[in-house]
Amino acid sequence: MSTMHFHLRLWKQKSGTDAGQFIEIDAKEIPSECSFLEMLDIVNNRMTREGKEPVAFESDCREGICGTCNMVINGVPQGPGRGAACQVYMRKFENGQTITVEPFRVGAFPIVKDLVVNRSAYDRIIRSGGFISEHTGGAPDASTTLIPKPVADAAMDAAACIGCGACAAACPNSSPMLFVGAKVTHLGILPQGQAERKSRARNMVRTMQEEGFGNCSNYYACEAVCPANVPASVIAMLNREYIRGELSEAVGAID
Amino acid sequence: MILDAKIPEGPIEKKWTSFKNNAKLISPANKRKFKVIVVGTGLAGSSASATLAELGYQVEAFCFHDSPRRAHSIAAQGGINAAKNYQNDGDSVWRLFYDTVKGGDFRSREANVYRLAEVSGTIIDQCVSQGVPFAREYGGELANRSFGGAQVSRTFYAKGQTGQQLLLGAYSALSAQIGLGRVMMHENSEMLDLVIVDGHAKGIVARNLITGEITTHAADTVLLCTGGYSNIYYLSTNARGSNVTATWRAYKRGAAFANPCYTQIHPTCIPVAGDYQSKLTLMSESLRNDGRVWVPKAKGDKRAPQEVPEEERDYYLERKYPSYGNLAPRDIASRSAKEVCDEGRGVGPSGLGVYLDFSGAIKRLGEKTIRERYGNLFEMYQNITGENAYERPMRIYPAVHYTMGGLWVDYNLMSNLPGLHVLGEANFSDHGANRLGASALMQGLSDGYFVIPNTLGEYLSTQFGKKVSTDLPEFKKTEAEVRAQIEKILAVKGNVPVDEFHRLLGLIIWDQCGMARSETGLRKAIEDVRALRERFWKEVAVPGTGAELNQSLERAGRVADFLEFGELMCLDALIREESCGGHFRVEHQTPEGEALRHDDKFAEVYAWMFRGENTDPDLVREPLHYEAVHLATRSYK
């Protein structure tokens, strides 16, 4: 098996209150078939053998679906190519290349340590409306409501969001509207989601703003980096849904 | 000691109804007085937390991830079974029940499996009403596909991301309850011990993974929904964080561990490429609907797959199991792949691989249809291997995927430790010695949405006026022991990274307690695990302190538990002198090389009880009585 060499610049930061800096590491003899995170594992284990503290980074499923991993590789959230950072393979890089790895830079995602950030703001947005209120046991038979295939497919495309935070990290405004729009679209186009449609968009956008995220100004950087291929059209849908939600409240309509 | 499964009286199809008719209820006013701790927020944990909170219980949920949405249930690809018979192809609750018992090689508890099949349909109803975007036909009806071990199409799916959509459904229900203040959610919190008060499970000790803070939590009952232990093999399809710690520490506090040797090796995974590898990636079993499995007939045939003419290919699953063909159950498909590779007919650089070929399906259905059905899987395959599976067959090899063993539970999902309930993959009850595809999601959600809300009252109705607080000495003592264990790990100050021990442990277990097991191999494995454990406590390197985010420390704690658990797993495999499902003892096979069960001796659950460090555990047997199905040799021919 062939090996490769890389020059790494890795972000080190003891905690959210300490200052951070890049450390420079020569990563020698990296198997060319390994993934980016496996390369970091190798580097971390070498540091550990030398008695140094490894660089903290998050990952779990390592197949691009759990959304745990998050880092910026050479300026691109979740790294080059489609998919999450765990799906980046070293064969995408040149031998000898310098690779810079840093955390997501989003005010609403405070840095915890090294490459680890706190993305709990996304959970709080979901808690404010990203669901259909229904209780276990009360559901009618699943075949009662027919849902045309194109609608089900479009809902699935939006629901594919993995909640990783790359959209906000890529956006100059730190806007998570691809994430919020994905959920509002998923639930808003299904018949089951109609009852709370207006309040859902209203409450989720309000929470998003309270958390300190910005708004969309059509850079489309989010769509370019999204590991789950969520289309930017969900933001257009979100804008429409949000306006309806706000208007509805402003005029005192029953929603 | 006798383990009483508390199976309700009556014919099998009436047991669950009669249980519910007679179950102890907790009134709404009393529900809010009871606190329930739920550990783990995958399918089982999220669905249980949300449902119990809706009912009015006070719920505190814990997960070691940064969000409940990260749990490994999210990675399940293919689907979820339900006996809806929407296809009019002859499915029924009975058939799903029978397929599951048979698929499990007659080593599961009949009553539990029947209940699972019985509630399977309502799970689909529940998920659809949450907005789970299951695949649909053009007319708007729900679509189904078939899966291994069944001759009907009863699997519901959402592209190749069914687990993700079901988990996000349960997560949204949980999120709604958190938003309403009915569930207190503790993210980044790893359960490190179970607190026992007067013989009852009454709380946990948890460590905050960000701050290192160690806290104790008291409740009226504890639900463990902490998943399986596949990662004992180091390389598995499980997420890196999946571990045995919660169930293992519960075992060391008195909970019986049942059938630990029952592990599932999934036949369709991307083959191992090298030592650096951190995990294996599954290619959904649904691919076997359209892909055909083959190897060259000749040994050492190094030609590219396209150059091997049709008549020189061995479609060995179709040859050996004509009626199920490529959809033979997982254990059988895996073992067959191992056999052909052991014969020297494996493909790929390592020779440990077989082809999964879509050329026929592409010709028949067109590339567009195949892309629609499996597009994301083909993409994932190309990303990892650099090969295009539309043009050449995939290379696949079995990998560890799921563990059927787990903490022993009765019909109410309560362990032998009163107050401790165990749900989902963490318990042992429904899959016997082999799980059928698309049944894990079904079980996790069945336990969480529909079983535990009905069975919890059996225990809680005995607990009025028995509240405990974390001020009790039992909490202080357990907390001190957790702290001591962390200090002990930090004090080793060796220079070998945790991953290295984990990898070595994985090799031992894979070689001796993987797809084929033997008495000599298992005895050696036990020795090797002991030696590796000793080395771990002398040489492991864990930089940093316990009072901060310290990923080496987290992993070291989990690997330390795996190093103990591995011994129990091999012991269980050694004592079970038969082959059944995923447990294949080479000494016990038919002349054709199929698993040979010994029902006269082993139609039993083996539940192990901890008796102290460096002491052999006690073995307690629960006999399995088959009243509804007739014990038979499995045949998929």
Image: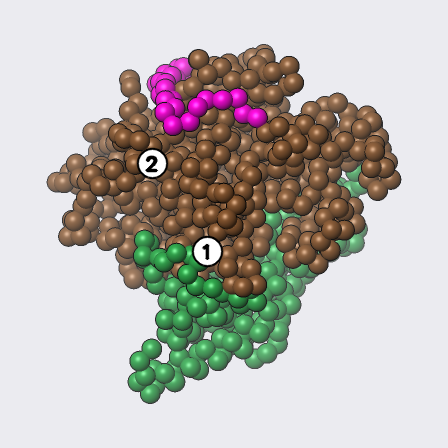
Q: Residue at (45%, 70%) from the top-left corner?
A: A188
Label 1 belongs to which residue? B168
Total marks shown come to 2
- Colour in which chain A is shown? green
Examine the rendered structure and indicate whether residue A49 appears above or below residue A35.
above
Q: Chain of mark 2?
A: B
Magenta-colored segment: predominant secondary structure: loop
The foreground one among B131 and B404 is: B131
Q: Give the structural element (helix, strand or loop) at label 1.
A: helix
What stretch of residues is rendered in magenta?
Answer: B606-635
Disc 1/disc 2 C-alpha distance (Å): 32 Å
**Left or right: A36 in relation to B43:** right
Please provide percent x and percent y for residue B106: 46, 25
Please provide percent x and percent y for residue B79: 53, 47
Q: Chain of mark 1?
A: B
In primary-sequence order, the first of circles 1 and 2 is 2
- Determine if residue B217 is in view: no
Q: Quadrant of residue B111?
A: top left
Q: Residue at (49%, 75%) from the top-left corner?
A: A238
Quadrant where the C terminus of chain B lies? top right
Q: Residue at (27%, 30%) from the top-left corner?
A: B10
Examine the rendered structure and indicate whether residue A132 appears above or below residue B70.
below
**Left or right: B324 in relation to B572:** right
- Colour in which chain B is shown? brown
Quadrant where the N terminus of chain B lies? top left
Label 2 belongs to which residue? B13
Examine the rendered structure and indicate whether residue B275 appears above or below residue B632.
below
Q: Residue furthest left?
A: B465
Tell me the amino acid under the disc marked 1. Answer: Leu
